[in-house]
Image (cartoon, helix red, strand yellow):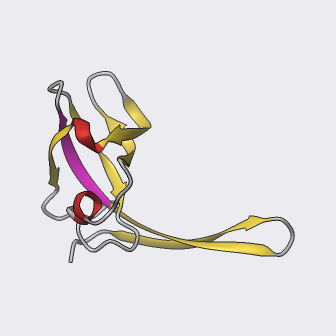
Amino acid sequence: MDKGIKRKGQLKTGSEKKIFFSANYRKITIKTVDGELILGKINLASKQRVSDLFTKDENPFIVVVDAVSKDVQGKTLFINKEHIIWVEPEDDGEVK
């Protein structure tokens, strides 16, 4: 199982309704078809591995937070999976 930081919390919508969420961030590097390298974090949530986002998740986009590239610093990016050549998780995977 990938290592990472796990966070749990709740969002309040209305006076009584609560939605619970879980975050399990993993640091990664992405190379896109235009040659761009993007460093950032992805939330694995209930997924066990980074590869599960690409093989078991039907969403065509991945969300990268705290993204850094030549044109971006600390932004949240939504990246179409069809534009990704490869993804490399960091060895330790821990997000501090």
**Depth order, front residue of 92/83:** 83
Q: Residue furthest right?
A: 15
Relative vertical location of residue 10 with respect to residue 84 in this rendering, above or below? below
Q: Confirm whether residue 50 shows in the render.
A: no
**Depth order, front residue of 58/37:** 58
Determine which quarter of the picture holds residue 94: bottom left
Q: Residue at x 30, y 68 (%)?
A: 4
Q: Confirm whether residue 35 shows in the render.
A: yes
Q: Residue at x 27, y 44 (%)?
A: 81
Q: Position of residue 65 (x, y in %)?
A: 41, 46
Q: Position of residue 36 (x, y in %)?
A: 20, 28
Q: Position of residue 66 (x, y in %)?
A: 39, 43
Relative vertical location of residue 79 with respect to residue 21 in this rendering, above or below? above
Q: Is residue 31 magenta?
A: yes
Q: Residue furthest front?
A: 58
Relative vertical location of residue 20 with respect to residue 44 in this rendering, above or below? below
Quarter holding the C terminus? bottom left
Q: Position of residue 43 (x, y in %)?
A: 38, 60
The magenta stretch is 26-32
How many circles with numbers are drawn on the protein? 0
Q: Residue at x 37, y 46 (%)?
A: 61
Q: Is residue 29 magenta?
A: yes
Q: Is residue 53 left or right of residue 89?
A: right
**What main secondary structure does the magenta stretch of the protein show?**
strand
Relative vertical location of residue 85 with respect to residue 56 in this rendering, above or below? above
Determine which quarter of the picture holds residue 16: bottom right
Quarter holding the N terminus? bottom left
